[in-house]
Image (tube, rainbow, N blue to C red):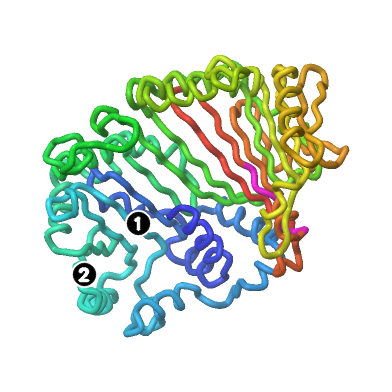
Amino acid sequence: MVPTAAVLGVALMATGVWASNTVINDLFGGPQPDRVFPADTIAYAQIDLKPSASQMAGYAGFIGKLPDSVREDINDEEDPAADFFEESFDYLDYEEDVAPWLGRRFGAAAFPSGEGEQGVAGAVAIAVTDEGAATESLDRISAEEEVEYVLRDGFAIFADSASILSDLEGGIESDGSLTDAPEFSADMEAAAGDSIAAGWFDIGAASKLAGDALSSATGGGSGYGDYGYSTGPEVPELEELDITGRAVAAVSVESDYLEVRGDLLDFSAAGFSLDDYEPSETGLTELGELPGDTVFGFGGSGLDALSEQAWNDLSGAIPEITEEIEAGAAETGSLQIPGDFGKILGTQTAFGTSAVGGTDDPFSDFDSGAFQYRAAGADKALFDELAEAAAADSYSSGPGVKEEGGTVVLSSGSSSQEKLGDDPVYQQVMQETEQASLGYYMDMRAMMEATEDAPDADQWGAVGFTTTFGDGKASSLLRWAPSGG
């Protein structure tokens, strides 16, 4: 929901109609839909098209940098909500039946309910600025769509049945609203303060409900159904994993880029947790050392230690699977898992390819295109052996192996002599990566050049993604920086 809401939000806020109505309608701020859902909500998402003053400035700058072909499709004199409502509810006239009362904030939630499937039900909230003007239209929607609704605190809340709405109301009366839940409020404040769209998920609560439902469906048995056997390796039951944690994601717009942030908080499962992942080394040095014409790039720091930690954690949860993989690697005679992760990954790692296919399939040339793999502190002798094996099994020469200041470089094909880190667009989407452990990069300009419908390919910029670990959480940041305007 969050990425979809991002695109919708940017398109809506680009229009003069919604922007001006927002400013006139009580200026900025106001209640969010989390106030009309119960505190024990499991999953929640919101779209906020009533921005703050700083958001409005960010939107204006970002719209100016969108590719020409995107900006041409934005009609700043047309209310885009009209098309949605008139297509979805053709029995309503938008200007007369909807526009007078429709607010600019929307939410959806899943929460425990005796009337829902497996004990969970959902509801949708739409901001209402004039309850008197809205009642007739809401009654028609309720009758035509066979749903129930209730008005509460400036929102119309829709659900499949009156009993689900009753459970929602009862939850708020007994335990308060989602706004009052301390963990939810802290998570959203930290990650989703000034966002177009945001989502929150209680992983632990959802896991418990899923485990209860599975146990009920299988009569408390093994989970393999009536036959009581499985054809694959044995895996632990869901309740045995003891999963806890929460996730939050948010979309915001700055003048230069659109940003999606996601946090995984207090996660633990099968005896391991994010507290175990405290990298000793961070930064994406080798990613920036890839050739300047890299289209897709991946980089990491301390992946040798992180991979070994992850493998040991998996071994405790699914030993049959990990032991089988370890035995298979040992048969090759040159690789031991997890002990040899450092020989392959080194302390700083990066892989990039400059291959882009044709217009029908931009990924079609990856097998034959140029690539480079970089691993600081890796075992060059091992890569020499792998390159020889690759050449022996191929009609063409294998990839080349060399060492640059302690970094093993495995490469194939011709690449630019310039460095990816010197590209201003790369710098924009991959800024502030000093604490990152993982990073991804995709050059949208090269991708769009390989399509038929991109006359402004050079204006699409790039997408960057980073992940950091620390303080018991994993935080990810995705940025798209177009270069139009």
- State left or right for residue 118 relative to residue 311: left
- State left or right for residue 5 relative to residue 229: right
- State left or right for residue 445 relative to residue 335: right
The reply to whether callout 1 and callout 2 are in contact (CB within 8 Å) is: no
For residue 341, what is the image quadrant?
top right
Label 2 secondary element? loop
Name the residue beneath numbered marker 1.
107
79 shown above or below 237: below
For residue 186, what is the image quadrant?
top left
Work out whether residue 264 or residue 52 is closer to the camera in this orientation and state it.
264
**Cα distance, mark 1 to mark 2?**
16 Å
Work out whether residue 233 or residue 393 is closer to the camera in this orientation and state it.
393
Q: Position of residue 19 (x, y in %)?
A: 53, 66
- Amino acid beneath label 2: Val
Label 1 secondary element? strand
Q: Position of residue 248 (x, y in %)?
A: 42, 41
- State left or right for residue 40 relative to residue 194: left
Name the residue beneath numbered marker 2.
147
Dot 2: within a 10 Å radius of its alpha carbon, few (fewer than 14), some, or many (20 or more) residues? some
Query: Is residue 307 visible from the viewing direction of this image?
Result: yes
Q: Quadrant of the C terminus?
A: bottom right
- Residue 463 falls inside the magenta stretch: yes
The numbered mark, 1 or 2, whose residue comes first in the sequence reads: 1
Region of the chain picked out in magenta, as a range: 458-464
Work out whether residue 282 or residue 431 is closer to the camera in this orientation and state it.
282
